[in-house]
Image: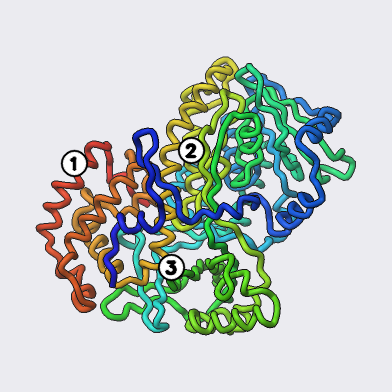
């Protein structure tokens, strides 16, 4: 097996450049040719947008002129009102947080009310971790217990299905069963949070698609014009366009294809990149297997894990399949594969006789052990050739906040690929920090205060939020890209598996000195265990693990790694290399907990 190291991983993922005296990592997986893709749109919407482009869509100046004649709604700037753009997971949670502080909240959402429409089958099951759940727990009122009790399924670690079709390996997330993640249906959680916000008093405006002509310019610290195209979400009598004169701060939570972000760029108020990776994803559903469990049996001295409690991964090099359990015992699977290519790609697996033939051969070649759990090759092929393809990309935004006019949080400013399961968690953590900073700058005793919440107070709040969150957003974006290669290639690598077992042993032997990078990402957030600090520490820790296992060359030695590594040498390396960095970063590992 090839030696796994972070330096080689970075070489696989990034080109390294120097700018302004600093090293800059540019992802190798971006596809300039796909720049026309819109991260916010469904496949049908992308096709419609392309047709509109060919037909000659109206210019921005013409569109702005149309909004000058539109119906007007005014939202006052009395220190009590706030506007949220986007009613996805982050937007809905943000609305609840603001409402519980006493703010009056208007929420504008481009789609119809998700509570009244079926799932489109595009969404990967969420992996929700302690880091993100802290924002929900902080609200109190039984919301945390309600979500875990009604919507979530525990996930204890990875269950890796090796390419030989036989061996199944369990790789624990935390140090023991007390630490786990949760699998939650995105649409179910979104419906729950919208329901909660509506009950708390949020005014929702569904079917309102923001235009890039929205105006955030002007000298005043607060105030903007939001331009919406309406699709009848608030009643059949609504006009096509609406101009909302907003005299209070706006919090943009409108996702990876954020129209707020595009409007700010159009006005020269920010810049951003959207790096689309060459692989997309499709959903593949697994029925409830009943007693035909496909978990890890604990063979060859490994740990056993019931199939319901693991993230299943079939690592196959250039592609992979993942599956998470649902509360009804079924599994939501996701295939990750190249979008384009003549043979093994989503483009090649078209809904034609030739495409189905290619897909059938591919499924039988790479996922023969999976087919019985899906219901046979025909069911797997049918889902792959007919389900829509999702886009995966990373958004990096130069400026998140413009005075007290607007701040972008969640995917609107820092969308990431899903391979660390932290997109939702990072966005939830944004809302937690927003809550903390509103309390510091704009509220009295945690409640809305028009006297304290001045324009300049909101300026300071938004500036502080961007300063706190942006370095961490950059760090988790990089780690998510790294984890893509880890899950696709390395989870099936014997050496990597051995190092992970040694790491787990060290966590249990020296819990006050080392926690895995994965544990710090998922269960951190307090005690200065930020994404950025975790990224730095993780590199040092992996170098230590590699050194401890450097002499283990063959399969037999690697299989016994967790029992034969030099524990005394390990403690020496932790004391000399890791502990000084933890002290420098003021890390408190005792806060890394479920």
Residue receiving disc 1: 580
| Percent coordinates x, y for residue 567 in the rendering | 13, 61
Q: Are marks 1 and 3 in contact (CB under 8 Å)?
A: no
Q: Residue at x 57, y 62 (%)?
A: 280
Visible residue check, residue 287:
yes
Q: Residue at x 54, y 69 (%)?
A: 335
Tell which circle, 1 or 3, labels the residue nearer the N-terminal end: 3
The disc at residue 310 is: 3
Q: Where, quadrant-wise, is the N terminus in this rendering?
A: bottom left
Dot 1, crowdedness within 10 Å: few (<14), some or many (≥20)? few
Residue receiving disc 2: 432
Tell which circle, 3 or 2, labels the residue nearer the N-terminal end: 3
User: From mark 3 to mark 2, how far is it between C-alphas?
Assistant: 28 Å
User: From mark 1 to mark 3, how far is it between C-alphas?
Assistant: 35 Å
User: From mark 2 to mark 1, how far is it between C-alphas?
Assistant: 29 Å
Check disc 1 and report its element: helix, strand or loop: helix
Q: Nearer the viewer, residue 346 or 412?
A: 346
Q: Are marks 2 and 1 in contact (CB under 8 Å)?
A: no
| Percent coordinates x, y for residue 399 in the rendering | 52, 32
| Percent coordinates x, y for residue 519 in the rendering | 34, 53
């Amino acid at each position: 097996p090839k030696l796994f190291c972070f330096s080689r991983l970075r070489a696989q993922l990034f080109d390294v450049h120097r700018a302004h005296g600093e090293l800059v990592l540019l992802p190798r997986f971006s596809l300039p040719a796909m720049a026309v893709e819109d991260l916010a749109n469904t496949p049908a919407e992308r096709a419609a947008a392309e047709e509109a482009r060919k037909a000659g869509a109206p210019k921005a100046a013409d569109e702005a002129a149309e909004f000058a004649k539109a119906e007007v709604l005014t939202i006052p700037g009395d220190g009590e009102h706030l506007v949220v753009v986007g009613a996805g997971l982050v937007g809905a949670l943000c609305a609840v947080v603001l409402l519980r502080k006493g703010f009056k909240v208007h929420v504008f959402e481009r789609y119809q009310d998700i509570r009244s429409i079926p799932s489109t089958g595009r969404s990967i099951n969420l992996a929700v971790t302690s880091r993100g759940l802290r924002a929900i727990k902080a609200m109190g009122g039984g919301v945390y217990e309600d979500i875990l009790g009604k919507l979530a399924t525990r996930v204890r670690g990875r269950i890796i299905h090796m390419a030989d079709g036989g061996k199944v390996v369990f790789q624990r997330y935390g140090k023991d069963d007390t630490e786990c993640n949760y699998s939650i249906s995105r649409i179910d959680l979104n419906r729950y949070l919208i329901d909660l916000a509506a009950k708390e008093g949020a005014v929702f405006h569904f079917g309102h698609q923001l235009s890039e002509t929205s105006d955030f310019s002007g000298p005043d610290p607060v105030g903007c014009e939001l331009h919406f195209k309406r699709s009848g979400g608030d009643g059949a009598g609504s006009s096509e366009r609406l101009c909302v004169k907003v005299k209070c701060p706006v919090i943009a939570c409108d996702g990876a294809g954020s129209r707020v972000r595009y409007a700010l760029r159009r006005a020269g108020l920010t810049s951003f990149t959207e790096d689309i990776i060459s692989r997309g994803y499709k959903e593949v559903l697994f029925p409830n297997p009943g007693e035909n469990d496909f978990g890890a049996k604990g063979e060859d001295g490994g740990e056993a894990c019931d199939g319901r409690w693991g993230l299943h991964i079939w690592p196959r090099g250039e592609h992979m399949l993942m599956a998470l359990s649902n509360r009804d015992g079924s599994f939501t699977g996701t295939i990750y594969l190249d979008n384009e290519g003549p043979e093994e790609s989503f483009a090649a697996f078209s809904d034609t006789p030739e495409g189905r033939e290619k897909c059938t051969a591919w499924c039988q070649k790479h996922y023969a052990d999976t087919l019985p759990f899906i219901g046979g090759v025909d069911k797997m092929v049918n889902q792959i050739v007919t389900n829509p393809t999702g886009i995966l990309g990373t958004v990096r935004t130069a400026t998140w906040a413009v005075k007290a006019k607007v701040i972008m949080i969640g995917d609107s400013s820092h969308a990431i690929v899903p391979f660390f399961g932290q997109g939702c968690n990072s966005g939830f953590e944004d809302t937690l920090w927003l809550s903390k900073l509103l309390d510091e700058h704009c509220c009295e005793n945690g409640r809305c205060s028009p006297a304290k919440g001045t324009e300049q107070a909101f300026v300071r709040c938004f500036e502080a939020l961007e300063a706190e969150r942006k370095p961490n957003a950059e760090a988790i974006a990089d780690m998510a890209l790294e984890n893509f290669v880890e899950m696709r290639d390395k989870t099936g690598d014997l050496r990597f598996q051995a190092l992970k077992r040694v790491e787990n042993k060290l966590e249990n032997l020296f819990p006050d000195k080392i926690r895995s990078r994965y544990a710090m990402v998922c269960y951190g957030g307090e005690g200065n265990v930020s994404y950025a600090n975790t990224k730095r520490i993780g590199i040092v820790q992996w170098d230590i693990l590699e050194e401890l296992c450097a002499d283990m060359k063959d399969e037999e030695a690697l299989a016994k790694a967790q029992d034969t590594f030099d524990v005394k040498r390990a403690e020496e390396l932790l004391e000399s290399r890791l502990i000084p960095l933890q002290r420098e970063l003021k890390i408190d590992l005792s806060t890394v907990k479920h």
